[in-house]
Image: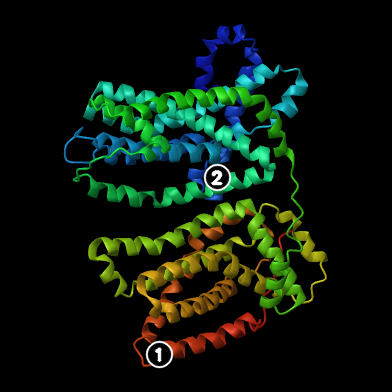
Amino acid sequence: MQEFRVLKILDRCQGLFAKVGVDYPVMRKILQVKLLMDRRRVPTVLTMMSKKKQQDDMLTETNYFGKSLLVYGFIGCMMIPFLMLGNQPMLGNQPMLQMSIIFSMMLFMMTTSMISDFSSVLLDVRDKSILSTKAVHPRTISMAKALHIGNYLVIITAVLMAPVWIVSIIRYGVLFGVVFLVEIILLDLLILVLTALVYFGVLRIFDGEKLKDMINYVQIGLSVGLVIGYQIVIRSFDLMQIDFEWVPAWWNMLLPPIWYAAPFALLQGMTDPYFIAMTILAVSVPILAVAVYIRQLPKFEQHLMKLTYQGGDGKGASRPGLQALAKVLCTSREEQAFFRFVLRMFGSEREFKLKVYPSLGIAFILPFILLFNTLRSGGFAELSSSSLYYAIYFGLTIIPTCIAMARFSGRHKGAWIYHVAPVQDITAFHRAVTKAVLLRMFMPVFLVQALVFILLFGGHIILDLFIVILNAIVYTSLCYKYMSKSLPFSEPMAESQQAAGWGIMPYLLMIAPFVVVHYGSTLLPYGPYLYLAVLVVISIWIWTGGKGKERQVNINA
């Protein structure tokens, strides 16, 4: 079995472990196995890697964690511009702004990384069910778990913060770097303990399924944050030539990143009570949090057993709202049943949400990024008089992704039910999928965007927004018609990367003709009204199932 550098370091301290009652040889073996298994887990920051590439790397024992460190190192380099804010270093309260931004980025990255990639470490319940039955002392198990967590926390923090830490020493001096290092350690402790205490609070109130859902949404947030983070970094270069003045206020006490920036203000000789109070909070809160965590650890371990519960709450099968919605949108009882089934799978399939929801987040913010750039250059008057409301068509980019992913599932082996179900009209499956994609995935994003766009551009774009909705119906039908016609959730999720990658690019390009025709209709007298009427007829024909003969269905059971 592979030897790890951290194990060689621990070998020199095995006498200390023996003094505190830890069986070091057993603990070392447990930790070695944990580290080996972690090498094979694909971190969230590498989820865009193709599945074929992952399988090839698995055969060659590729270290995924090592690859993810390159991403963390790159993100660490992205923090450096924030250290250069302002025209002159260390003037006034400027370090408060610089370090608040840097510690905010560290807080976001470390917290989301701990939750998304290392929740399996913090919430590991296999130790109790497997090792406790093998006469392994609980103290040995707990020490192995603590070292496992600490190892990754130290490595990720070092890679993430090393670039900006080195630059801080060069720019501001050794004393600044020493204080920075101490603050990083304290913030790490706070992140680790608060993450565990949040888990503890969730498990005290809810079951393990709620906690798993929370972790899934954090994974989604991390994926979206990594994609859009470059926008912040690009704009940071514009801020480098601006002088800032920090004005202390009572609400600063509620923001931990500002606590850790306060000691740097004290280094400049600022003795404002706010800075002193926030420095005290930066030191005392992590220590108190660790004390609370140690005190609550036995109860936390008891509540972790809720994670072994795999059942659901049994609700949702007969929700009256869902039943009524299915009757309104679907033309047959079979289609109503399939529609309810697809909607529930969209809401409960965690791997599906992890693959699709980042695309939803990106499609949601892209139009606003374009609007923000216009606001910066021309102001609100120029924006409201422009035709940039056509940017809402970016929301349609989520449709081919959802349709491509709808046929995959982590529970695809249950697709045998399609063979035994008394289905008379197989096309009802496909109509149900298109309607579920529009209702569950597209419409929530579109409605929020539409509300903001009406506020920005005025009520005259309402007709255009209705045209966008009808275009979305037609576009969804076309995407589904020419994509794979496998039944929903019938293929393994392991094959999903190829389908949702470059394979959807032709369907994304199909959005352009809709935009061109929409804009062209506005150049004709009553053009938008005529175009709307045509789209209504086409949409009714599509919505009622007039798609013609379906192609052969491929079911992978």
The kind of secondary structure element at disc 2 is helix
Task: Indicate the amino acid at tag 2.
Answer: Gln
Instruction: Please tell me which of labels 1 and 2 falls first in the chain.
Output: 2
Q: Is residue 257 above or below residue 485?
A: above
Q: Quadrant of the N terminus?
A: top right
Q: Is residue 163 above or below residue 220?
A: above
Residue 92 picture location, percent across and down? 20, 34
Instruction: Locate residue 217 relative to residue 299 in the image: left or right.
Output: left
- Disc number at residue 527? 1
Q: Is residue 62 above or below residue 20?
A: below
Q: Residue at x 67, y 52 (%)?
A: 410
Q: Is residue 31 visible?
A: no
- Seen as rendered, the residue at the extreme bottom is 525
Instruction: Locate residue 270 relative to residue 197 in the image: left or right.
Output: left
Q: Nearer the viewer, mark 1 or mark 2?
A: 1
Q: Which residue is mark 2?
A: 54
The kind of secondary structure element at disc 1 is helix
Task: Indicate the amino acid at tag 1.
Answer: Gly
Q: Residue at x 62, y 80 (%)?
A: 543
Question: Which image quadrant is residue 515 in?
Answer: bottom left
The color scheme shown is rainbow
Between 390 and 320, the residue placed more toward the observer is 320
